[in-house]
Amino acid sequence: MTKKNQFWRGMLIGAIAGGAISLLDKPTRQAMKENVLKTSRKVSYIARNPGKIADKVKGTASKLKETFEQVSEDIAYITDKVDELRELTPQVTDIIKETKETFSKSDEDDLLRDVVGEEIINK
């Protein structure tokens, strides 16, 4: 036998020996017994009812698919809205600048009328 095979063989023997030694503790044995019973019940249920298990798996897969589709739709919607905002932002900026300029000119004209008088401005 090669050294590589002996290494894995030694690992397996050590694991078995460690497991056997740990079973000397009564609470560990009881816990293992309960776990083995639960597992064997689950395995026997699955063996007796493969159709139910298959239906549950199909239902879960269907729910996952629906969720994935909904998330994809949501992402597409958000992406569209972000693109719209990117397109609108320069337009809104231009409108705000024009509005500011309009109000600024109007305010300057009003101030000038108040100070100088309307006859001078209209000439």
Image: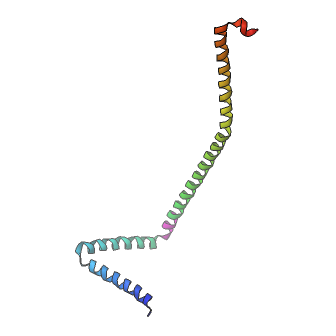
For residue 4, above or below residue 24: below
The answer to whether 119 appears left or right of 79 in the picture is right
Q: Which residues are magenta?
A: 50-55
Image spot of residue 21 (x, y percent): 27, 80
Q: Is residue 11 magenta?
A: no
Q: Is residue 100 left or right of residue 59?
A: right
Q: Nearer the viewer, residue 87 or 38?
A: 87
Which residue is rendered at x = 40% and y = 86% of the image? 7
Q: Residue at point 68% right, 19% down?
A: 105
- Image vertical order of residue 74 relative to residue 107, above or below: below
Residue 121 position within the rendered picture, expressed as x and y whole percent measured from the top left = 72, 10
Residue shown at 65%/41% (left/top)? 86
Which residue is found at the position 57% from the left and 52% from the top?
71
Quadrant in the picture for residue 14: bottom left
- Residue sitting nearer the eye, 58 or 112: 112
In which quadrant of the rendered image does the N terminus lie? bottom left
In the image shown, does 2 or 72 lie closer to the viewer?
A: 2
Position of residue 37 in the picture relative to residue 54 (left or right): left
For the C terminus, the image quarter is: top right
Task: Name the image colouring.
Answer: rainbow
Residue 6 location, x and y as percent? Answer: 40, 89
Q: Position of residue 90 (x, y in %)?
A: 67, 36
State the predominant SS element of the stretch in magenta.
helix
